[in-house]
Amino acid sequence: MKVTEKIVEVNANHILNIGVDVSSRKLDVHFECALQINKREVYREQIKNRSDEIEKSLKKYLSVAQTKGFLNLRIVCEPTGPYSINLLAMAKHLNCLTAYVSGEAVKNSKVIEFNGTNKNDLVDAEVINSLAERNKVLIHRTYSAEYTRLRILNSHYEDIDKAYVSSRNQVHSTLKQLWPDWSSKKSILYSRTGEALYKCYGLNPWKIVSHNYSYFAKRMRTHCKGVWSSTLKQIYRDAELSVKGHCSDASSTLESILGDHYENYLRGKQRKASLKDEMSEILSEIRQEDPRIPQARKNFISEFHIARLLAETGPLSDFSNLDQLNKYLGLNLRERQSGDYQGKVRLSKRGRSLARKVLSLVTLSLVRKKHLYGPDYHRIKTEKDKPGKLLMCIFMKKFLKSFFGIYRSNQSFDPRRLFIDRGKYEKLNSPIALEAVI
């Protein structure tokens, strides 16, 4: 028999936990105070999700807490995005403690508390309070103004990027109807040549062939200097094929629709460039407060991706070890085992999904054949026949470990350190080894 010790946390600070179920218009509140060993006084209330109503109620709860011998309140709720802003901001304003509970924990705890899965707001508030009493809570992190702005801009950049990709898809889809014989690469549409073609002709083949090739080539070179003759000849030839045997009745309508999509693409491109510059400026401000943040390095990570990653993680100083950071991003492993059954070990994916996307974008450029992780990635994929998705997860974790290690050690990035253990690396950088190299 294996006997171990387990530390049970005691509410030594005499904190009164207030469980709150948050919705867009109202808050359901539940908390309890002990009267005797087997008797508790239960408080339930429903208030409007407005700052003035919340302030009035919290002051009332503080008065009750002082009467019952508590020193402070701890406001506990689920992370519900914008709907919990009023509650948590007012709690901080009144110097109350705050914490989150996992939505998944609330859902599963209802089965334990009530032997069922019924869903209503009063039940949710009671379960939240029960989890808080057992200290099954998550930290409610508050950020500086720079980190707050960075996270908001990163979320906005993601929305702009999705709209940008959608507009490009719609451009190509509409172009296939207007210009069915387009045979050039898609990338030409989004280059200087494509922008000149849109500006001069609205990407309408009927307008292009309304003049001879010489006029077309001269006009295009006026708006796009350096364009290749072979490219212009192919575009003109495709335009001639597209108008041959086709009716032009719908061309003006399709041109108008295509113009809307292309304008959306141009706006998205401009807005993305502006957001990149703004986020990089905020990152430089954060570096003044925390100079340990790794510097951008070619073939490792760019300044913009550092800004996006920090927007999701928040201050790296909040994490005492790599395991905490992995759990926060959902990169920790989830096991499935019962008796003789042994399921696959997968990522939990319970953390910030956007952070994992940013990590995948960074890692994707590093696993190319001639890049940092490329040789190892392709060797393992070939020799061990591992799926690319699994290897991407492995190298995402490897990159995060390197990035966090650079921050904690406050040293510059050294690619040699990635593929050897600590002992070999220290021998490699020992004075004797350096003298031999010199």
Image (cartoon, rainbow, N blue to C red):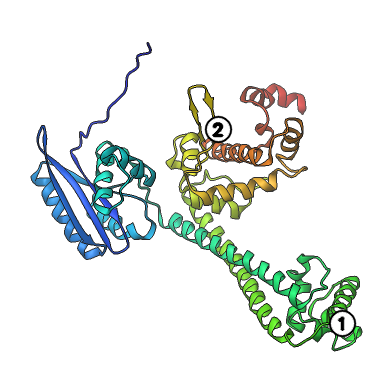
Looking at the image, which is closer to me, 379 or 130?
130
Report helix, strand or loop for mark 1. Answer: loop
Point out residue 338 in the picture as x, y percentages from the top left corner: 47, 26
The quarter of the displayed image where residue 383 is located:
top right
Report whether residue 242 is seen: yes
The quarter of the displayed image where residue 213 is located:
bottom right
Q: CA distance from mark 2 to mark 1?
A: 58 Å
Looking at the image, which is closer to me, 228 or 278?
228
Residue 222 vertical placement versus 308 (above, below): below
Looking at the image, which is closer to me, 37 or 180?
180
Report helix, strand or loop for mark 2. Answer: loop
Point out residue 125 in the picture as x, y percentages from the top left corner: 25, 49
Q: Can you tell which mark lies on residue 165?
A: none
Report whether residue 97 is seen: no
Query: Which dot, 2 or 1, sits closer to the camera?
Result: 1
Badge 1, how many Cα within 10 Å: few under 14, some, many 20+?
few
**Residue at image point 67% right, 67% down:** 169
Residue 388 vertical placement versus 338 (above, below): below
Residue 266 vertical placement versus 4 (above, below): below
Q: Amino acid at mark 1?
A: Lys
**Residue at image point 25% right, 65% down:** 50
Point out residue 94 in the picture as x, y percentages from the top left corner: 22, 54
Residue 204 vertical placement versus 302 (above, below): below
User: Which residue in the protein does label 2 denote?
Assistant: 345
Query: Which quadrant of the figure contains the C terminus?
Result: top right
- The answer to which of marks 2 and 1 sits earlier in the sequence is 1
Number of numbered tags placed on the structure image = 2
User: Which residue in the protein does label 1 denote?
Assistant: 244
The quarter of the displayed image where residue 317 is located:
top left
Q: Amino acid at mark 2?
A: Val
Looking at the image, which is closer to me, 396 or 127?
127
**Residue at image point 77% right, 42% down:** 369
